[in-house]
């Protein structure tokens, strides 16, 4: 029984996998079981921040494996506290809750917003969270309820009440939603990743922040995919001229290990008390160590490199035959091609380049430190595939 047959027989059939087994790699080059090398423009869906087998990250994790692999959150571990401090110092937040994924980080944000309103205005007084049409916030029932895409809602109702979806970049619609509902929060992705890599308008985000501040409604930034240097700043909200009351992050934070975090700002820093929330594996010392290594290396030099690579991609793709548009920030990009995106990605893989899709676009999420020569080779392949 080969790997494809074994997977089909025993793994839940929830993924449309590419016909490729990854067996190794280094940086932005992955090795398939077919013996071929592939340039990685997906980085595990924005997870492998420094690519595959990054030496500094690997050595940090190995050292922690030899100390404490896991203990419950009834005890202290240094990596978790150090990571929380680093996140707070670099964002202005005050405390951090750790989970295992982006969905869990968003669940924490939802709970914190509702408890903040409950503590201040009375139980159940302001339960509603406004999110955007075309948003994506996770696959648990509550984060699925927050997600503003009907395609993800099929077959899974009834859904958690307390979510209202409004069109993106329509400030009047957001204001009406806040007036017509008893709201505790507004949750925004600065770039709608699964929705097609579509950035929000800066003026809209700033207007949303003003409306939230006027009504004592919490502004929540979903930075699960956009965070940790992906867009050219540590977090995407730092490019929009706002500071959220709390935000979620995951994916690239752990560099390949499962970790999610919900940094809490001044308003909500003490909202979650003992027993109000928890996670068995949240802030696990191995995952926290990996995240500490990643976060400590996302400095201005790296971020400047991300922005430069962004410009390099735009120069190579904008106006190229078969390319209709390029959207996104930093190294989170969507490429609208004349050929269907799925066909373009298939052709790229046949020619040694791994890319992703998002709605009708080819999605590019390469490691943040992908060498320019590999990036140029991959872009050449993508240009050819797009025609």
Image: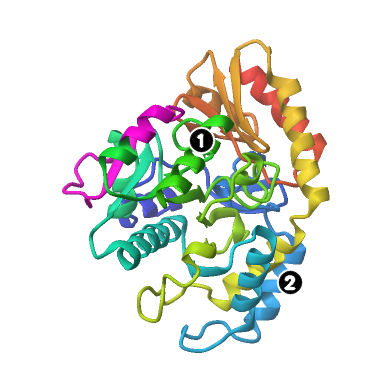
161 falls in the magenta region: yes
- Residue placed at 27% from the left, 48% from the top? 182
* Residue 153 found in image quarter: top left
- Residue placed at 55% from the left, 17% from the top? 337
Is 121 drawn above or below residue 227 in the view shown?
below
The residue positioned farthest toward the left in the image shown: 158
For the C terminus, give its image quadrant: top right
Q: Which residue is mark 1?
A: 207
Image spot of residue 41 (x, y percent): 64, 39
Q: Which residue is mark 2?
A: 59
Magenta stretch, residue numbers: 153-176
Q: Earlier in the sequence, mark 1 or mark 2?
A: 2
Q: Horizontally, is 198 left or right of 311 in the view?
A: left
Image spot of residue 89 (x, y percent): 69, 65
Mark whose residue sits in front, 1 or 2: 1
Q: Horizontally, is 35 left or right of 12 in the view?
A: right
């Amino acid at each position: 029984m080969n790997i494809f047959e074994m997977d089909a027989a025993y793994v839940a059939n929830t993924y449309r996998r590419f016909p490729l087994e990854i067996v190794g790699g280094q940086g932005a080059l992955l090795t398939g079981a077919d013996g071929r090398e592939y340039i990685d423009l997906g980085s595990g869906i924005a997870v492998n921040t420094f690519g595959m087998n990054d030496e500094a990250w690997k050595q940090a994790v190995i050292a922690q494996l030899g100390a404490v692999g896991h203990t419950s959150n009834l005890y202290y571990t240094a990596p978790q506290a150090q990571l929380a401090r680093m996140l707070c110092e670099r964002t202005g937040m005050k405390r951090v809750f750790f989970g295992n994924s982006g969905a869990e980080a968003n669940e924490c944000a939802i709970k914190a917003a509702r408890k903040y309103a409950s503590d201040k205005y009375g139980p159940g007084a302001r339960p509603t969270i406004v999110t955007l049409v075309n948003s994506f916030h996770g696959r648990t029932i509550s984060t699925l309820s927050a997600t503003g895409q009907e395609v993800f809602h099929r077959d899974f109702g009834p859904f958690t009440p307390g979510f209202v979806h409004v069109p993106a970049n329509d400030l009047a619609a957001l204001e009406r939603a806040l007036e017509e509902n008893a709201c505790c929060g507004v949750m925004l992705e600065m770039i709608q990743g699964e929705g097609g890599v579509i950035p929000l308008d800066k003026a809209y985000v700033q207007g949303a922040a003003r409306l939230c501040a006027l009504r004592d409604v919490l502004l929540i930034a979903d930075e699960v995919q956009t965070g940790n240097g992906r867009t050219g700043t540590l977090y995407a909200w730092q490019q929009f001229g706002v500071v959220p009351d709390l935000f979620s992050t995951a994916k690239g934070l752990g560099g390949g290990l499962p970790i999610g975090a919900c940094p809490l700002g001044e308003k909500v820093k003490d909202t979650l008390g003992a027993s109000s929330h928890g996670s068995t594996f949240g802030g696990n010392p191995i995952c926290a160590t990996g995240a500490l290594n990643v976060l400590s290396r996302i400095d201005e030099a790296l971020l400047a490199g991300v922005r430069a690579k962004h410009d390099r991609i735009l120069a190579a793709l904008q106006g190229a035959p078969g390319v209709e548009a390029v959207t996104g920030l930093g190294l989170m990009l969507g490429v609208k091609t004349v050929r269907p995106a799925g066909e373009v990605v298939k052709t790229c893989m046949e020619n040694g380049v791994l890319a992703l899709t998002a709605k009708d676009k080819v999605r590019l999420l390469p490691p943040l430190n992908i060498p320019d020569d590999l990036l140029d080779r991959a872009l050449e392949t993508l240009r050819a595939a797009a025609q």
